Image (spheres, rainbow, N blue to C red):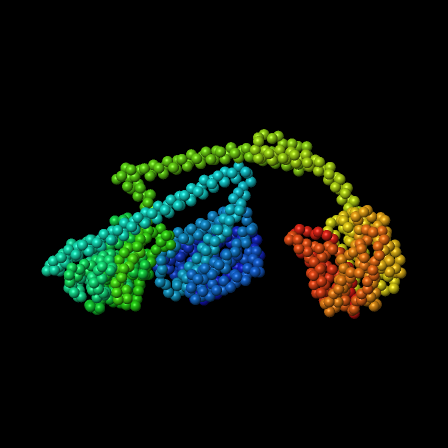
C-alpha cells in the first residue's frame, strides 16, 4: 500500500507541476489558501486519530487525503516561474522521497520532499505587505502543527498504518515547507520594512513600534527562558541533593544495624518495617565473608553481583545510585569486620516522592534507569514486578502492547497503572522490551539536568559512575507560584509590584514615543508636501515656482536645493535649444559620412570582399573603401583620421575627395600615397594627420601591391593557418610636406584572405585596461574556416565590443576583409 500511495503522490506531482507552469495570480492565491486549509485539517485529523482509536481508520484516511491536497498545492506553487536548471536537483530529490515513502521511511521521505520543494519564486507576484501577511500565515501554520503534535507512537496495521505514514510524511513535509517559506517571506519585510505604506508619518510610527516591540519581545522571551531553565536547574539540584542525603541516611542506618553482629538481622528487619513508607520496596542483604543472604524485599537477578560491592569500599562510593544493565536503584553498603550489608530501593518510587517535594517531575534518563521494570524470576519461574510500571493513558496502543507481553506470562493487567502525569517506563521480558519516551523537544530544552554520583556494575566489576537526572518544571507554574506564595510571604508581592511598575513605565514611554513620532511626522510631512507641490509645478513646465523654506533641517535644505535646481533647469532649457541646434548639425554630418562610405562591396571575379564600420560616437573618423577597377583589380582602402566627431569626419571627407580625384587605374600605390600626403599637408591644421593602407588586389592572379602609410599592418591569413603582416610603406599622411613611400607586394593563393583594420579593433580595452590585441585578431581569423567575409567582420566587431564590456566603446571599429576564391 505504501508503494501505491507513493505512485499516487507521483502522479499528483506531475499534474500539479504542469498546472503550476501556466499559473496566473488568481490561481496562486487559490493554491495558497488551499494549502493552508489542507495543512490545518490534516494536522487536526492526525491528532484526532491518536485520541480516538475507534475512529483511527477513517481519520487517517482523511489525513492522507488532506496531505495529498496540501502536496498538490505545494507542487503547483513550486512550479510557478520554474526554470530548467531547477529540475536538476528537484527531480532526483522527489524521486528519492517517493522511494523512501514506498519503503515505509516516511520521515526520510518528508525531509527529501521538503528539500525538493524549497522554491518560492511565486513570491515575485506579491508586494511587500502581502508577503508579510503570507509570512504571518505560514508562521501560524507551523506553530499550529507543532502546538498539537501527536502525543507519541502508536501501533497500527494494514491500511491504517499506510495512511498514517503517508499523512505523517506529507504533514512533516508541508510543515518544513511552510517553516522555510516563513523565513523567505519575512526576508521581504527585512528588505522593505515599510510594508508598502506611502505616508512617511505612518512609516515613522511603524519603525518606532518595531524599535519598542521587538526588543521587548526578545527580552521577555529571554527572561521567561532563563527563569524556566534556572528554576528547573534549581529543582534538579535539590532533587540530586535529596537523593544523596537519602543514600547517606540509608548508609548510616545500615552501619548502625551491623554494629551488633548478634542482632544484625533483627535490626535490618526493623529498618525495613520503619522505612516502608519513605523507602518503598526496600531490599536488604546481609552476610558474613563472601556470602550474602536476602533479609527483606523481593529478589533481584543481580544479587550475586552485590557480594563484591562491600569489598570495593575505599575505591568506589558506599552510597548513591546503583546501576545495572537494565535497572537503577538507590542503595548503600556497610562493612564491619567480616559482616557486610547492602540495601537497595528502586529509584522510580523515590523519584515519584521527590516530584511533590521539589515541585517538578523528576526522572533519570540515559541508558540505565528508564523507570520501572518487570523481570523473569528464575527462582520462582514466574514473571513479577520489581516496581510499579506507569504508562500514560494517552498511549493506549503502548499500554496494550505491554499488557499483551504480561498476559503471555500470566501477569495481571492491574500491574500497569495509569496516571494523569506521564512517566518514562520500561518493561523487560526476555527478548521483548517495551519503553516509552514521552519527552518533546521543547520539554528537553526547558528541563534542568544534573549528574548524580553512584556506582555501576558492568562487565563483571563495580566502578564509579554518574547518572543524568532531569527535573521538568511546567513554565505555566512560574508566575502562578508568585501569587500562590504571596499569601504566606508578604514580600512575594515585591516582584509583582516591580513588574507592574515596569509595565506602567513602558506604557508611559510608549505614549511619549508615539506623540513624539506624530509631531516629527507632521514636520516631515509638511516638507514633503511642499516638495510634492513643487514637483507637480515642475512637471507642468512652471520653472518659475519657488518653495518657501519654513525651517532649517535636512528636508527643508532639500527644498532650498529644489529652488536652485529650478533655476538651473531654466538655464538648462536655453542650453537645450543650443544642444538641439548642434544635434541637427551632427545629423547632417552623419548623413554626409554615410554617403561617403560604400553601401555594398563590389563584385570582382575571383574575390569575396566585405567591409564594416561601427563608430564609437555619433560621427567617427575612420574610413574604408573598396573601389573596383576596369582591369579586374580592386583598390582596398582603410584610413584612420586623428581625432573624433565632426572635425574627424571633415578630414575623412577631404581624404576621400583627394583619393577619388586620382587616376586610380594607372597610378602606383607609392605615387598615390605621396600625392595624398601632399594634398593633406596643405589642407590640414598642424597636428592633424591620417594613417592609411592602400592596396591594389588582382582577382585573377591574387597579386597584391600595397603601401602602408603608418597604419596598423593588415593580416594576410594563409589557408594553412600561417599569417604575415603587410608593413611596407612609410610615415603617416599630412605631417611632412614631402614623404617617400616604399611599395610592398604579396600574393593570395585560393582560400587566403587579407584583413584590413583600424586600431579600434586591437586596442579595445576592458575595465582592467587589458587590450583585445593582435593575438585575438589572428586567432579569430584563423577560425574563419571558409565562412563569408561579412560574417567574419561581424564576429570580430562583436567580440571586441563584448571584451570592452559595460564601460562602452572607446574607438571606432573599421574592417575590410577580402578572400581569394578557389
Q: 249 or 4: nearer the eye?
A: 249
Q: 452 or 522: nearer the eye?
A: 452
- Outermost residue on the left side: it is 262
Q: Is residue 629 left or right of residue 264?
A: right
Q: Position of residue 6 (x, y in %)?
A: 46, 64
Q: Position of residue 347 (x, y in %)?
A: 25, 57
Can the viewer see residue 55 in this picture? no
In this rendering, the count of numbered labels is 0
Residue occupying image coordinates x 42% and y 59%: 168
Residue occupying image coordinates x 85% and y 59%: 670
Position of 520 relative to 316 (above/below): above
Residue occupying image coordinates x 57% and y 60%: 84
Q: Is residue 439 left or right of residue 789?
A: left
Q: Is residue 13 left or right of residue 292?
A: right
Quadrant of the frame with the N terminus: bottom left
Quadrant of the frame with the C terminus: bottom right
Residue occupying image coordinates x 45% and y 60%: 110
| Occupied quadrant, residue 796 | bottom right
Q: Position of residue 744 (x, y in %)?
A: 82, 62
Q: Is residue 265 left or right of residue 149?
A: left
Amino acid at each position: 500500500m505504501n508503494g501505491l500511495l507513493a505512485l499516487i503522490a507521483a502522479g499528483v506531482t506531475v499534474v500539479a507541476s504542469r498546472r503550476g507552469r501556466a499559473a496566473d495570480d488568481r490561481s496562486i492565491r487559490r493554491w495558497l489558501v488551499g494549502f493552508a486549509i489542507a495543512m490545518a485539517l490534516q494536522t487536526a485529523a492526525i491528532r484526532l486519530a491518536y485520541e480516538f482509536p475507534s475512529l483511527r481508520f477513517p481519520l487517517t484516511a482523511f489525513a492522507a487525503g488532506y496531505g495529498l491536497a496540501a502536496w498538490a498545492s505545494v507542487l503547483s506553487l513550486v512550479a510557478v516561474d520554474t526554470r530548467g536548471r531547477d529540475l536538476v536537483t528537484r527531480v532526483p530529490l522527489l524521486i528519492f522521497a517517493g522511494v523512501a515513502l514506498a519503503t515505509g521511511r516516511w520521515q526520510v521521505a518528508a525531509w527529501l520532499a521538503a528539500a525538493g520543494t524549497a522554491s518560492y519564486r511565486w513570491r515575485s507576484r506579491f508586494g511587500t505587505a502581502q508577503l508579510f501577511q503570507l509570512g504571518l500565515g505560514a508562521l501560524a501554520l507551523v506553530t499550529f502543527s507543532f502546538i498539537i503534535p501527536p502525543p507519541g507512537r502508536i501501533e497500527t496495521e494494514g491500511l491504517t498504518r499506510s495512511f498514517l505514514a503517508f499523512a505523517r510524511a506529507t504533514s512533516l513535509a508541508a510543515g518544513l515547507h511552510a517553516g522555510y517559506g516563513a523565513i523567505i517571506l519575512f526576508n521581504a519585510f527585512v528588505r522593505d520594512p515599510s510594508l508598502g505604506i506611502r505616508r512617511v508619518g505612518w512609516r515613522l510610527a511603524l519603525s518606532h513600534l518595531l524599535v519598542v516591540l521587538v526588543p521587548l519581545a526578545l527580552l521577555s522571551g529571554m527572561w521567561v527562558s532563563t527563569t524556566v531553565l534556572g528554576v528547573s536547574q534549581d529543582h534538579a539540584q535539590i532533587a540530586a541533593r535529596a537523593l544523596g542525603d537519602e543514600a547517606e541516611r540509608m548508609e548510616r542506618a545500615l552501619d548502625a544495624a551491623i554494629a551488633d553482629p548478634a542482632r544484625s538481622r533483627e535490626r535490618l528487619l526493623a529498618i525495613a518495617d520503619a522505612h516502608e513508607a519513605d523507602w518503598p520496596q526496600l531490599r536488604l542483604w546481609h552476610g558474613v565473608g563472601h556470602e550474602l543472604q536476602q533479609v527483606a524485599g523481593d529478589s533481584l537477578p543481580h544479587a550475586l553481583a552485590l557480594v563484591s560491592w562491600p569489598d570495593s569500599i575505599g575505591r568506589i562510593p558506599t552510597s548513591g545510585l546503583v546501576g545495572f544493565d537494565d535497572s537503577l536503584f538507590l542503595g548503600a553498603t556497610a562493612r564491619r569486620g567480616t559482616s557486610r550489608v547492602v540495601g537497595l530501593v528502586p529509584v522510580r518510587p523515590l523519584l515519584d516522592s521527590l516530584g511533590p517535594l521539589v515541585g517538578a517531575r523528576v526522572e533519570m534518563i540515559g541508558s540505565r534507569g528508564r523507570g520501572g521494570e518487570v523481570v523473569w524470576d528464575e527462582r520462582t519461574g514466574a514473571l513479577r514486578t520489581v516496581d510499579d510500571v506507569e504508562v500514560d493513558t494517552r498511549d493506549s496502543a503502548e499500554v496494550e502492547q505491554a499488557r499483551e507481553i504480561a498476559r503471555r506470562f500470566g501477569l495481571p493487567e492491574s500491574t500497569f497503572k495509569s496516571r494523569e502525569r506521564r512517566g518514562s517506563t520500561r518493561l523487560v521480558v526476555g527478548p521483548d522490551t517495551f519503553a516509552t519516551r514521552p519527552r518533546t523537544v521543547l520539554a528537553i530544552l526547558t528541563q534542568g539536568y544534573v549528574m548524580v554520583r553512584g556506582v555501576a556494575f558492568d562487565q563483571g566489576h563495580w566502578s564509579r559512575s554518574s547518572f543524568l537526572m532531569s527535573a521538568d518544571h511546567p513554565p505555566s507554574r512560574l508566575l502562578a507560584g508568585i501569587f500562590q506564595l504571596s499569601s504566606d510571604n508578604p514580600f512575594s508581592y515585591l516582584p509583582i509590584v516591580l513588574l507592574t511598575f515596569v509595565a506602567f513605565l513602558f506604557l508611559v514611554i510608549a505614549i511619549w514615543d508615539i506623540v513624539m513620532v506624530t509631531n516629527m511626522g507632521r514636520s516631515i510631512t509638511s516638507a514633503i508636501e511642499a516638495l510634492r507641490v513643487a514637483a507637480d509645478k515642475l512637471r507642468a513646465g512652471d520653472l518659475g515656482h519657488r518653495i518657501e523654506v519654513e525651517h532649517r533641517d535636512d528636508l527643508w535644505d532639500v527644498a532650498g536645493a529644489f529652488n536652485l535646481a529650478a533655476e538651473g533647469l531654466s538655464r538648462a532649457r536655453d542650453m537645450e535649444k543650443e544642444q538641439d541646434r548642434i544635434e541637427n548639425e551632427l545629423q547632417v554630418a552623419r548623413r554626409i559620412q554615410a554617403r561617403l562610405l560604400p553601401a555594398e562591396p563590389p563584385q570582382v571575379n575571383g574575390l569575396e570582399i566585405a567591409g564594416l564600420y561601427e563608430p564609437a560616437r555619433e560621427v567617427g573618423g575612420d574610413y574604408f573603401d573598396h573601389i573596383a577597377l576596369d582591369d579586374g583589380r580592386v583598390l582596398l582602402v582603410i584610413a584612420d583620421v586623428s581625432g573624433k566627431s565632426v572635425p574627424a569626419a571633415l578630414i575623412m571627407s577631404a581624404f576621400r575627395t583627394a583619393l577619388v580625384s586620382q587616376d586610380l587605374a594607372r597610378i602606383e600605390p607609392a605615387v598615390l600615397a605621396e600625392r595624398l600626403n601632399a594634398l593633406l599637408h596643405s589642407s590640414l591644421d598642424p597636428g592633424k594627420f591620417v594613417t592609411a593602407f592602400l592596396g591594389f588586389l588582382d582577382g585573377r592572379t591574387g597579386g597584391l601591391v600595397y603601401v602602408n602609410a603608418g597604419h596598423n599592418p593588415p593580416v594576410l591569413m594563409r589557408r594553412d593557418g600561417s599569417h604575415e603582416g603587410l608593413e611596407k610603406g612609410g610615415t603617416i599622411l599630412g605631417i611632412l610636406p614631402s614623404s617617400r613611400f616604399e611599395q610592398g607586394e604579396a600574393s593570395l593563393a585560393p582560400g587566403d584572405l587579407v584583413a584590413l583594420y583600424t586600431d579600434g579593433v586591437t586596442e579595445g580595452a576592458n575595465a582592467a585596461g587589458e587590450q583585445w590585441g593582435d593575438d585575438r585578431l589572428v586567432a579569430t581569423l584563423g577560425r574563419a574556416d571558409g565562412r563569408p567575409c561579412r560574417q567574419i567582420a561581424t564576429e570580430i566587431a562583436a567580440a571586441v565590443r563584448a571584451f570592452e564590456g559595460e564601460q562602452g566603446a572607446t574607438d571606432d571599429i573599421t574592417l575590410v576583409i577580402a578572400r581569394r576564391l578557389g
